[in-house]
Amino acid sequence: MANHVFNNLCLHKRLTLLSTNPCLKFFRLSSTQSQANDEKLAQELGSDKKDDEFRKLNLMPGKAQQRYDTKKYFGEIRSPRYKRMKTNQDWTNVWPNARVFHPSTVPLPIYMGWTVPDSSEVPAGKYHNPELLKIPNFLHLSPLAIQKHCQALKRFCTKWPAGLDTDEKCDKHFPLQIKTQEFAFSGTSIRWPDYRIVELSIKMCDLPLDPHASDKMKRLLRERYNQKTDTITITASKCPTRKQNYEYAVYLLTAVYFESLKVEEWEDEKTEEDWEKFYWDKSESKKTIVSYMKQIKPELKDEEILNDQRVKSFSESVSRLFDQKEDKSSLNEYKRNVLQILF
Amino acid sequence: MFHKVLTNCFIHSINCSQRVHFLSKQRLLWSSNAGHNAVNTVISRCLSSTPSAVTSHTVVDTFRTNQSDPRLHSTQHLAMYYTIPADIATKLFVLGGFSGQQQRAFKTFRETTLMVRRPALEVMDYLRRAHYNRPVNRYVLYGPIGSGKTFTANHVLHYGFEEKFVLLYCPNPTDWVQYPEETSQSSYKGQRMDTPIDAAVWLQLFRTHNNHLLDELDLRASKQYVWSQREITEPGDPLKNILEHGISRIKHSSDCMAVILKEIKEQSVSGKYRVLVVVDKANAFYESSKIKYPDRSLVDIDNITIARAFKKLFTNDWTNGAVVATVDKKLVVPYRIHKVSRPFKAKAKSRASDNWGPFTVSHISDLPHDLLTNTGFKHFDPFIPIEVPIYDDKEMESCLNYYNDRKWIQRPIAKTVEGRNEIKFLSAFNPLETYEICCGL
């Protein structure tokens, strides 16, 4: 218990604390005192002269024993540091590094704790509060501290390029992004194996690809390509060093790019199950419609049939049914188009 | 001013202040397949604030019609029950176009009645307006489970019967493809599997449907068909001979059936007759079959003679016909989720974790493209998809009035307005669910 707290207690409480607190009981057991008691007892036992007086057995120390003078063992206690702080002080000198929360140094009235809901309880204060000790505090990272750090580092840095003031400009000029992680480990060895992992990401629209190449690239990359954000992410972790992994990732990107530009002979064998989207021009649907129209009017030519507005809207509705998940609106559109043709 | 009449059958008005009791939320969750949106509209319908006026004529007028000829059905007959004359009903549905449960219901009601609903009228309207010299039109009926697709198809079948179409009716393709009575290796092509008994049964059905038409039209075979050394059909022989031959000689019945279908399809070009093909659960033809070869490998649908022959009717390379097909989700839904009236074989090795999963069927689509699969869609494209929705207010009232009339609903509390509202809420306006709820009342 802190000195100033103890002194602020009333006399009664001080005395009870001294008597009941096992830590404070040490001053009770002084050896000279017990010896004197023993001698006294021996004297009293030995003398049987006075029979008229009944000897009392004093088990409890009564008023005969002197009470130990409750001196103030605790010296003058200083007021907590936060009370002696000036408002214009330099906080970075008070808290230069990350440290555990220290209540008497932090000049803030902080409360942290659970209260019974809808009661007039106040959360626990900052003294003797383990919760405040458990959480991380960033008192070493005040804006002033950061400013000082930056100022110190500035002479080692070059200026930020003038033309790169927005994110879009950065993405435009530097489409390739490399992500790596640094670790600090305190142990017998400072090595951390995850340090070697390199993640390379680039947007597919930044690569010059034709439709066949982009489709082939998507198939080659599989899960490394994200449809929604249109980004390719290649994570290399095979090699032991970071430099090797970086070179490997760049190599993979190059290989995939040039491979997708090639057209192999067996790519013509792509069947309808493998179509990435529904090509109505190559589908059965077109053949049936064309043959249907020809059966009605044999003299019609293919181009005339395909240029017919009804056939065009029909083709769009069929493509929509295949490409997107079927739902009632697309089905109703399909129905409308079919009715236009059949009736 | 409302005047509530609380006798057995004469209940019309729905007082907007009636409270709906929440009997079983669980039942509601897996009874309705229409999803959250439908439930909200259901609730709003039950508690709607539009008052309905009391009409002076009796209930018999509002839910029944005397018009038993489907050719004369029109929008004025909507939500009314019409009776199929008993002799025609037995003729059309001898193989059982309805589920076993429904057939027993018809027996109890002592009549075969169907409700006139909008999808049926729509199909019949298309059948009237279609250009029969053009390739056949395909009409695909879709909707949630229990919404009345089979009933609509049967209504159209009756219409086709009255209009003197040649009827090719397949009530249950699963009987051919999944659970045939008997299978045998085909003598015509080694790879094919015959289903003799099912084919013979269908030929009998075909005969009952079209006997008089065959006499009238006098269709003849166009090629020579050699059944065996002694049984040969010469070109020019009437098709009836092939029919009789198939029924009597069950060994050749599958091939006879295939030949008859082929002949009818080829000769339809002449324009002497029109063909109406009605197929229930057409997506069974595009799912996998359950028939096995002797070496325990599965048979493709294209290798089952009668299924293959019937599938050829779905493409539009013939004229003077119409195809009305239903696509049903029941074939794709696991048995444990939805009570489906078909035989179920429990697998000994299924673990409890396999059975824990979705408890509704709303994640499975009931739209035709998804159910027909890509190959099916290619066969049917371009087709006209027709939605068969769940009951609306008028149809629901009519249905409950009919059950009252037939004394299917017996408990007095179920005849009150509150009881009716409860039935409507529990069934979520689904026709099959209404029937099943009323079974217990």
Image: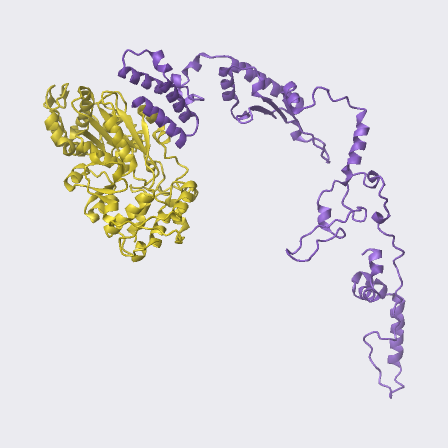
Choose top left, top right, bottom left or bottom right for residue A121. Answer: bottom right
* Image vertical order of residue B112 relative to residue A281, above or below: below
The picture places residue B169, in percent across and down from the top left corner, at: 22, 32
Residue B200 falls left or right of residue B45: left
Q: Is residue B241 visible?
A: no
Which residue is more in the foreground, B132 or B373? B132
* Image vertical order of residue B406 relative to residue B122, above or below: below
The colour scheme applied to this rendered structure is: by chain
How many numbered discs sit on the rendered protein? 0
* Residue that appears at 32% across and 11% down: A301
* Residue that appears at 33% across and 42% down: B391
The picture places residue A341, in percent across and down from the top left corner, at: 32, 21
Which residue is more in the foreground, A65 or B370? B370
Residue B39 falls left or right of residue A294: right
* Image vertical order of residue B282 relative to residue A292, above or below: below
Residue B419 falls left or right of residue B219: right
The picture places residue B112, in percent across and down from the top left corner, at: 20, 43
**Colour of chain B in the image:** yellow
Q: Is residue B219 visible?
A: yes
The picture places residue A147, in percent across and down from the top left corner, at: 79, 32
**Colour of chain A in the image:** purple
* Residue that appears at 37% across and 45% down: B428
- Which residue of the protein is positioned furthest toward the front in this rendering? B1
